[in-house]
Image: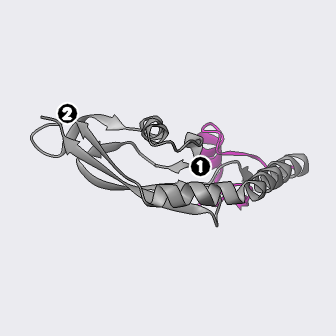
Amino acid sequence: MKLILIQDVDNVGNEGDVVDVKPGFGRNFLIPQKLAVTFSKSQLKQVEEKRSNEDRKIDRKKDVLLGLLSKVADLNITVKMKSEDGEKLFGSITKLDIEKLLIENDIVFDKKYIDLSTPIKTLGEHEINIKFSNDISGSFKLTIEKED
């Protein structure tokens, strides 16, 4: 089954790629999760236009984004949260929580650029990746401590 990826999918491909996958995987996972669309020339053209528009937008803002990444690289945020006796948190830290923490530190950008596959559910130091494009990315440290 030939599909066009709308988003990056681990072990399958990147956004805009035309991939050949097994029909069940495409119909039951990729398409319902809105990760891919069926292949057609018009769909391919739309995806390529969207990708080029996004690339142009990022190129125009490259200096600003690099400035944000330099601010973020020096950042070490510490958060206190309730947790069990071990390292497991009662709640979790999501992209939205990280976005709010960055806003508190006068760093503002959309949460879609925060590269976090699953919410954080443990105490300790975590590396949070920020990815604006393939060549503009960085990270900062988030430390989660136990609340007394």
Residue 56 visible somewhere in the drawing: yes
Question: Which residue has dot 2 on it?
Answer: 82
Element assignment for label 2: loop
Compared with residue 16, is residue 78 higher up or lower down, i.e. above or below? above
- Residue located 64% across and 47% down the image: 26
Colour scheme of this structure image? one colour
Nearest the eye: 59 or 118: 59
Is 121 positioned to the left or the right of 5 in the image?
left
Is 8 positioned to the left or the right of 85 in the image?
right
Q: Tell me where residue 25 appears, x and y as whole percent.
A: 59, 49
Q: Which mark is residue 104?
A: none
Separation of residues labelled 1 and 2 (CA atoms): 39 Å
- Residue located 70% across and 59% down the image: 62
Magenta stretch? 12-40
Kind of residue at badge 2: Lys
- Residue located 62% across and 36% down the image: 32
Q: Which mark is residue 25?
A: 1
Mark 1 or 2: in front is 2
Q: Is residue 120 magenta?
A: no
Compared with residue 17, is residue 53 higher up or lower down, i.e. above or below? above
Residue 10 visible somewhere in the drawing: no
Nearest the eye: 130 or 71: 71
Element assignment for label 1: helix
Kind of residue at badge 1: Phe
Q: Tell me where residue 80 appears, x and y as whole percent.
A: 24, 38
Q: Tell me where residue 135 appears, x and y as whole percent.
A: 64, 67
Q: Residue furthest bottom?
A: 135
- Within-10-Å neighbours for mark 2: few <14, some 14–19, many 20+: some
Quarter the C terminus occupies: top left
Residue 133 falls in image quadrant: bottom right
Q: Is residue 28 magenta?
A: yes
- Within-10-Å neighbours for mark 1: few <14, some 14–19, many 20+: few
